[in-house]
Image: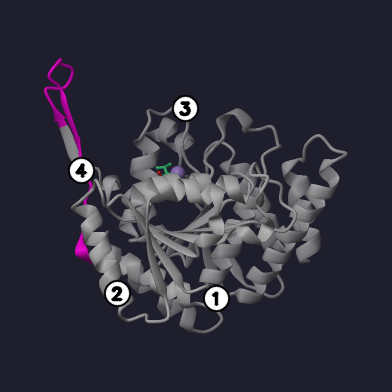
Amino acid sequence: MSATVATEVRPERLHTSDLPLRIGVIPGDGTGPEVTREALRVLDIFRDELKVDLIEFDLGADRYLRTGEVLPDEELVRLAGCDAILLGAVGDPRVPPGVLERDLLLRIRFELDQYVNLRPIIRYRGMTTLIPHHHDEDVDLVVVRENSEGLYTGGGGFHRKGTPHEVAIQESVNTRHGVERVVRYAFELSMRPGRRRKVTLVHKTNVLTFAGDLYQRVVDEVAVAYPDVTTEYSHVDAACLYLIEDPGRFDVIVTDNMFGDIVTDLGAVIQGGMGIAAGGNINPNGVSMFEPIGGTAPSETGKGTINPLAAIAALMMLMRELRQDAVADRIDRGIGVAVTKMATMRAGLMGFSTSAVGDLVIEAAS
Ligand code: IPM
Ligand code: MN
């Protein structure tokens, strides 16, 4: 299985006829299935206007514990044959750390060459967040996280493991090709309608003088082709501060895999929490995968109280990537109405059930 298999499948299908969209669904672990169910209920309201084949994948902790399999090659080939994939969440306390994360989630990202992790940080009107001085319009940016290399490639190893002289090496891999393609994606994105034509590189060039230098040089070179785009740089630690102090200074952030992972959790906080934060693992020429970024929430599993808006927002992003803008717009509106209603109702209610939030979106998007 190679990335080229994946990149050859989708565009051909999208430009041909009115074949149904093949959407792979990986409900996954923990609260993943609960939130995915709500996203699929939302999708169902479009059944008359959009032909969709749902292809369900049994991947995650249960399958691993039952069979020892994480991601058999045949499943990867089936995933590569989808037009896009919707993922709930993966990870489970019964499975040693890293098994599902590396061999399932990261393997899909790498093998399908989903080299952009696109994480919009948008605050819907009326959302309450932990940051009292932010207004809705202050929070409107997108993080373009490199998704195929950096510290995530798994390079490194132990030397004299378990001894007092143990050495643990974890390598960050940054290629010219990898950096350039993600930086180009960020510049293109900053030019799209509604964006403010500003790209901020977030890194730590004062300490990571090799990887950071490559990123900075690539940004400087690519910027020449985008004279209308303002380019800025922020160290990652300072960027965390600015996300709280003055997030309006950011439009498009481009950053490496690890920094992008970290700053987007902070980003979720200023959006209103993990319950609303969605992202896409994008291969612009292939098969992309969309997910709520929050994880499996083991302590909430099975209670029916987890917020499904992030999974519904992941579906919205999926529809946009498949150029179903009318559908995406309606889901977007549905989420907006749900957020407003939840804010007004919050005064009188303790919490929301997962399916009640789904109902709010369905009512507003129908
Ligand atoms: C995320 C998650 C993953 C990551 C984990 C589960 C491997 O935190 O999607 O942000 O680090 O990329
Ligand atoms: Mn993360």
Q: Are marks 3 and 1 in contact (CB under 8 Å)?
A: no
Which x, y percent locates residue 316? 61, 63
**Left or right: 220 with respect to 228?**
left
Residue 298, label in figure:
none
First reached walking from the N terminus: tag 2 or tag 1: 2
Q: Nearer the viewer, residue 321 or 228?
A: 228
Mark 4: amino acid = Glu
Question: Can you identify the residue that label 4 sits on?
Answer: 171
Q: Label 3 vs label 2: CA separation?
A: 43 Å
Q: Nearer the viewer, mark 2 or mark 1?
A: 2
Q: Is mark 3 within 8 Å of ligand 1?
A: no
Q: Quadrant of residue 180?
A: bottom left
Q: Are marks 4 and 2 in contact (CB under 8 Å)?
A: no
Q: Is residue 165 above or below residue 173?
A: above
Which x, y percent locates residue 354? 72, 43
In the structure shown, which secondary structural element does the residue marked by tag 3 occupy? Answer: loop
First reached walking from the N terminus: tag 3 or tag 4: 3
First reached walking from the N terminus: tag 3 or tag 1: 3
First reached walking from the N terminus: tag 1 or tag 4: 4
Q: Nearer the viewer, residue 153 or 39?
A: 153
Mark 2: amino acid = Val
First reached walking from the N terminus: tag 3 or tag 2: 3
Q: Residue furthest top?
A: 164
Question: Can you identify the residue that label 1 sits on?
Answer: 323
Residue 93, label in figure:
3
The boundaries of the magenta stretch are 158-178
First reached walking from the N terminus: tag 4 or tag 2: 4
